[in-house]
């Protein structure tokens, strides 16, 4: 069994132990003792190439930590907090394979890969629970009444159907809805900010912290603002879009419905004069690892473009190449920051 | 890497040919994502390649592959948790930093942190604490002794223990 174990820790030999004792003495509190240790350590290393090798091995460990301490971004404290967050997790179980499998599953879930749900098939029973999708998903579902819903990117909905009405609660993300006709039961999409009653038909709804957007493709819906000064209601027609915030209903704007809907089919984001912060938020829902930005930074920047939602990094590059004010920086290909370029660096 | 290499290479090729597809399928079911499954399957074989002697004495190649892949998944989760914690902490303290850090700097630090984390993994609390206080935060032996409520002799022992624990990744 143990021979099947990949990567086992090697036992330190007596030379490594000696080298470690020297190294600790080198960085003691008494400067005179440190100097003495340094001289004697040098002699010890010179005495045998195996001594030198054992020492080099340990010295490189110390060097690596010192690099973080001196050259790092942030303070040693930043590094410390990050390390503690990981090191204090319960360590992996060693004895029981069964427990190990359980912990793998727990960790995988902790990695926030909701793709588990994404691959289950769309049976009606499943739909009565949450439906979730992750960044790279486009999930189509047919509800029991024949209504079609597409979840694009990171999104989640709850479906509540009863004898009197049909309600889809959009928790976050982007959905496109094609409502099946049912004269008996009205159809609603709800977000924390809006209650949308379908009178037809085809539309999309996006919701994320503090902002709900509705885009109409066919026929019309009536929208009720759930927050804001008073209970505002509006009817939104095909070719129109409206945004709701904590302040209530925004102004109704225009939309190239045919083009936007085509975008949904081709995994494209079709934008006509939209605030950049809103666009970045939408892209972020389609990008594993997300996009970090300060929404307030981009006041006044607006975007008209067609962006590939299934290739969010390309979309970001497109944005950056047409907006010289933008600076896009990434770490490890996973973490992306977008901010305003410093003045002198603007192209 | 030629196909007709040492017995070890042939063994590796056979392992890959016979089991890669199966491992991919297993991972796809576990992870629910083809992309992740392909990555982890590939990395599993790379890890076995990197530890050349690991194939000796393997009687059940699939169990062995699964074990390797599971360990990789755990490592990835840990690396991810580390990145998240570091970047969150960094963004909290960003205002106090001189100038905006470049992605390259951040990446470099993340790589070093990940290596340190890997090295310290499994080390008991007090030696780990002594090691980080001394080498990362620059505390003196005496200060550490006080913090941990032990003698400086004990701090020496902790540091030696920590260094030895770390050396295997050097």
Image (tube, coloured by chain):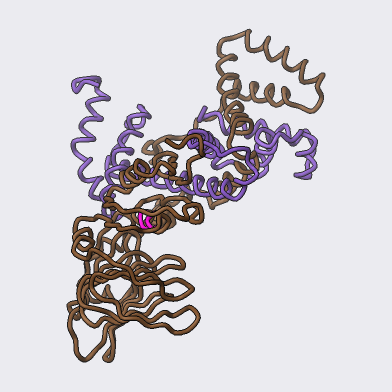
Q: Position of residue A223 (x, y in %)?
A: 34, 80
Give the number of callouts. 0
User: Quick one: quadrant of the N terminus of chain A?
Assistant: top left
Residue B71 falls within the magenta-colored stretch: no
| Horizontal and vertical percent position of residue A156 | 35, 67
Q: Is residue A192 left or right of residue A267?
A: right
The residue segment tinted magenta is A279-283
Is residue B114 depicted above or below A149 in this figure?
Answer: above
Q: Residue A286: x percent and y percent?
A: 33, 55
Residue A106 seen anywhere in this rendered image of the structure: no
Query: What chain is colored brown?
Result: A
x 59%, y 34%: residue: A72
Q: Considering depth in this image, is A60 or B56 the residue closer to the camera?
A: A60
Q: Most prominent secondary structure in the magenta stretch?
A: helix
Residue A321 in the figure: left or right of residue A245? left
Query: Can see residue A73?
Result: yes
Q: Quadrant of the C terminus of chain A?
A: top left
Q: Nearer the viewer, residue A296 or A207?
A: A296
Residue at 48%, 84% in the rendered image: A230
Pinpoint residue A115: horizontal percent, then vertical percent.
32, 58
Q: Quadrant of residue B97?
A: top right
Find out whether residue A281 is within the magenta segment: yes
Q: Which chain is assigned purple?
A: B
Image: B92 above or below A261: above
């Amino acid at each position: 069994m143990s021979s099947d174990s990949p990567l086992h820790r090697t036992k330190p030999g007596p030379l490594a132990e000696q080298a470690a004792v020297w190294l600790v003495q080198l960085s003691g509190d008494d400067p005179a003792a440190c100097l003495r240790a340094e001289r004697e350590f040098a002699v010890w290393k010179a005495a045998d190439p195996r001594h030198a090798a054992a020492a080099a091995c340990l010295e490189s460990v110390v060097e690596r930590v010192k690099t973080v301490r001196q050259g790092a971004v942030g303070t040693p404290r930043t590094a410390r907090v990050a390390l503690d967050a990981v090191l204090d997790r319960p360590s992996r179980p060693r004895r029981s394979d069964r427990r190990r499998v359980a912990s793998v599953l727990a960790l995988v879930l902790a990695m926030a890969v909701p793709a588990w749900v994404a691959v289950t098939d769309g049976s009606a029973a499943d739909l009565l629970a949450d439906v979730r999708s992750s960044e790279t998903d486009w999930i189509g579902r047919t509800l029991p009444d024949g209504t079609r819903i597409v979840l694009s990117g990171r999104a989640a909905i709850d479906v509540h159907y009863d004898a009197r009405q049909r309600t889809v609660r959009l928790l976050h993300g982007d959905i496109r809805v094609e409502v099946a006709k049912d004269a008996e039961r009205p159809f609603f999409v709800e977000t924390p900010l809006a209650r949308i009653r379908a009178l037809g038909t085809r539309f999309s709804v996006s919701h994320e912290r503090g902002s709900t957007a509705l885009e109409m493709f066919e026929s019309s819906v009536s929208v009720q603002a759930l927050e804001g000064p008073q209970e505002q209601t509006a009817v939104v027609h095909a070719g129109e879009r409206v945004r709701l915030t904590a302040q209530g209903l925004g102004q109704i704007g225009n939309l190239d419905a045919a083009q936007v809907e085509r975008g949904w089919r081709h995994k494209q984001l079709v934008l006509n004069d939209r605030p950049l912060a809103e666009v970045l938020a939408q892209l972020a829902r389609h990008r594993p690892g997300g996009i970090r930005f300060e929404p307030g930074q981009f006041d006044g920047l607006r975007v008209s473009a067609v962006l590939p939602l299934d290739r969010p990094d390309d979309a970001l590059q497109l944005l950056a190449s047409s907006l010289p004010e933008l600076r896009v920086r990434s770490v490890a290909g996973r973490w992306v920051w977008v901010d305003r370029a410093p003045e002198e660096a603007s192209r | 890497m030629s196909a007709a290499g040492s017995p070890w290479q042939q063994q590796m090729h056979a392992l890959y040919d016979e089991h890669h597809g199966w491992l991919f399928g297993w991972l796809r079911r576990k992870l629910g994502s083809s992309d992740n499954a392909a990555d982890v399957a590939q990395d599993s074989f790379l890890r076995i390649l990197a530890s050349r002697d690991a194939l000796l004495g393997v009687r059940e190649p699939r169990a062995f592959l699964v074990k390797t892949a599971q360990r990789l998944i755990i490592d990835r989760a840990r690396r991810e948790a580390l990145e998240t914690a570091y970047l969150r902490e960094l963004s909290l303290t960003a205002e106090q930093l001189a100038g905006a850090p470049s992605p390259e700097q951040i990446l470099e630090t993340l790589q070093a942190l990940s290596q340190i984390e890997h090295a310290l993994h499994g080390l008991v609390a007090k030696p780990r604490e002594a090691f980080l206080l001394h080498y990362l935060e620059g505390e003196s032996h005496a200060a550490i002794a006080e913090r941990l409520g032990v003698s400086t002799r004990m701090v020496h022992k902790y540091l030696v223990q920590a260094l030895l624990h770390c050396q295997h990744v050097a």
